[in-house]
Image (cartoon, rainbow, N blue to C red):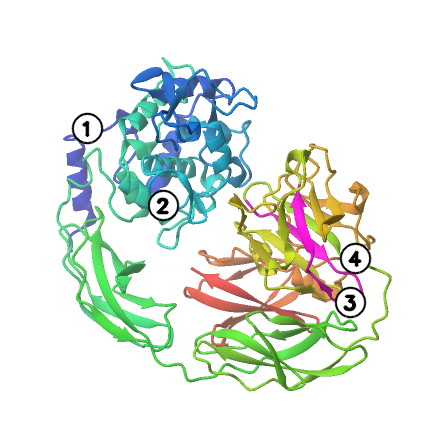
Amino acid sequence: MKNIFLFIAILSATFSSFSQESYYNDVDLTLTGLTLKNALKEKIVNTHTNFLQYTPDVWIASKITDANPENPDEVILIYGWEDGSDSDSTNDRTRDNTLQDNGSNGNFVWNREHVYPQSLGTPAITTTTIPGQDAHALRPVDKPTNSARGNKRFADGAGNAGDSNGGWYPGDEWKGDVARMMMYMYIRYEDICLPTNVGIGDSSLTEDDMIDLFLKWNVEDPVSDFERNRNTYHENTTDNSSAQGNRNPLIDNPYLATRIWGGDSAEDTWGIYTSSDTEAPTQPTDVVASNETTTTIDINWTASTDNVEVTEYNIYVDDVLTGQTAAVNYQITGLSPSTTYAIQVEARDLINNKSDKSAVVNASTTSDTTAPSVPTNITATNISGTAFKANWEAATDDTAVTEYRVFVDGAFEAATSELNYTITGLTVSTTYQISISAKDAANNESAQSPAIAVTTTDGGSNGVEELFISEYVEPNGGNNKAIEIVNLTSAAVSLTGYSIKKQSNGSGDWVNELDLSTGSVQNIVSGDVFVVIHGDADAQELIDNADLIHQSVSGIWGAPINFNGNDPVGLFKDGVLIDIVGTFGDSGNFGQNITLRRKASILSPNTTYDVNEWDSFAANTFDGIGSHSSTLGGTENNLKNFQVYPNPIKGNTLYFNTTKEVQVAIYSILGKLIKNETVTMAKKNMDISSLSNGIYLLKITSENKSITKKLIRR
């Protein structure tokens, strides 16, 4: 195998033979991966010397950089595709450049599209911050189209722009432009502009948060002269007062994205990479499968050779790329029991030359004949006269537990994938025997747990008569939005007839009604809460505690759970308002970038918003979701609000947010204890460098109470 320095020598010699932008003369273009990404970041940050004002600079620049080459009095509209001859103005590809949006209600105007939506930044981008003024990601757009796109994440599709696969497809003509803009924003602003926040795709095959969607679009839609002209304008601050001074490297050479993040090869417009090494590695041979389990298969192979160096192997399962490694062995995970898979290995070098795939090796996972363990620690909470919640600890299995079966007095009641179940329709002052069994995907079922006796109350009223909103979450960036509703009555309450609506911008009628009974949870037991989150939320605390994940209503992404800080939110019963957060008819920002939590002293709803009923917390405060201070206290509350981050984790240090000492045990998915440590106020982290990639269970214990959380190691 030849030394990598041979490649550097070849590459260095090639630089003098091919045209490249002088802008990059001080960048080491022999770098790869995240090291190259960081070098490009340094370059575009240092040369970003003119910080444009959203108004008027971006208007001025857009009329020049996005001018229609066939008519300089027009601007080209991103997402547009039609020449203006039909009756629909919203699909036009061009518009008179004087018809910029001045705030009037007219629609035949153009606006400045934040291709990376402001609300998806972390924190949110505004037009007074540098990311929100960056003209490399601002494009002219038709005003109604700008509204239709909103803050929808980009998703794959075909044809013209519009809603697609739960997001927004920019159109065949514009997808490459979008990809390169999103890559630029990620390189330039890092975690503020994560690709995983703005696009629907997979980041598992990259070292950071880049997703396959943008890499794919970068390959499929090559750079246009239109993009190149924009780049040239913005570098030249000497002649252009509304230029920034920096360039988008992915427009200058799309292959830089391939060199940083891998994937299929984009165009190498400089010719300095693909021309320096045209020889592919040899085909991997002697692929052997071993150590088959119900969900995993180990493979190893004989190393390929290359004229420079083999840098990585791609693993294909049933012709789908499922993993990458620099080693000559790999464990394929997440498989199904009793299933045969076709496995191949492909070698690639630094220039992304790929070998032929290896010969197919067929390997089968083993059968699953082992039942899960018996669920333990069965408890009952939220007991009323007619209902209670049964809770238990997770069972273990050699594959995975897929459901739990709940038995009442020995008779099957229901199946659930959760670690709790609400039993309703019971009789007051009656004792019931509750037991739980566990099943796996192969239909193996454990024995029932020892039954516990639970006695319902006499059904007497505690004086509280109605549900109300107990928490409101509006984050600083992204869609981690949530509404929590609490039941402090003495009985279980059916969600039938209850709904949430919002008033957009504090004006007009209530809109976007969401029926709360549309999910799997149909009742809220006494003392419990019901949590609705936005379908695009990614905060683990919200996901873990969600009872209803709301995707879309009538094509409006996430409404009404897409509320902003000036959108009052109302709780309705049979169409009648019973509770509100925010003041109806007031467009002021009562709840922008903030978490509001109802005070423990409040026991009833209120159709008039009273700020004195709420405690206010900083943006992105999620630790109280899933419980209410009037319903849960002491150790149990401490554990429910216990935070583990990051999760999923790629690094070696796991962090905890706790207000008291707890014991943390890490188990394999099969129930084997791997690590056990005490987490204190002085030491709130744990070294997990010894853990391989996979799924684990965290058991957190304090004062004889415990909870279990899932941990994903990537």
Give amino acid for label 2: Gly
Q: Is residue 252 left or right of residue 510?
A: left
Q: Which mark is residue 466?
A: 4
Q: Looking at the image, tell me whether mark 3 or mark 2 is earlier in sequence order.
A: 2
Q: CA distance from mark 3 to mark 2?
A: 48 Å
Name the residue beneath numbered marker 1. Answer: 19
Q: Quadrant of the C terminus?
A: bottom left
From the image, state whether disc 1 or disc 2 is nearer to you: 2
Q: For residue 650, say whether it is visible.
A: yes
Name the residue beneath numbered marker 2. Answer: 157
Q: For residue 518, which quarter of the picture? A: bottom right
State yes or no: discs 1 and 2 in contact (Cβ < 8 Å). no
Give amino acid for label 1: Ser
Residue under the point 69% across and 40% down: 568
Residue under the point 22% across and 37% down: 268
Q: CA distance from mark 1 to mark 2?
A: 35 Å
Give amino acid for label 3: Ala
Q: Is residue 610 left or right of residue 226?
A: right
Residue 254: percent from left, percent from top: 28, 37
Judge by depth and name the residue closer to the eye, 549 or 119. 549
Q: Secondary structure at mark 1?
A: loop
- Crowding at dot 2, Cα within 10 Å, few <14 / some 14-19 / many 20+, comes out as some
Q: Secondary structure at mark 4?
A: loop
Residue under the point 22% across and 29% down: 20
Q: Secondary structure at mark 3?
A: loop
Bounds of the magenta span?
A: 479-502
Judge by depth and name the residue closer to the eye, 231 or 146. 146
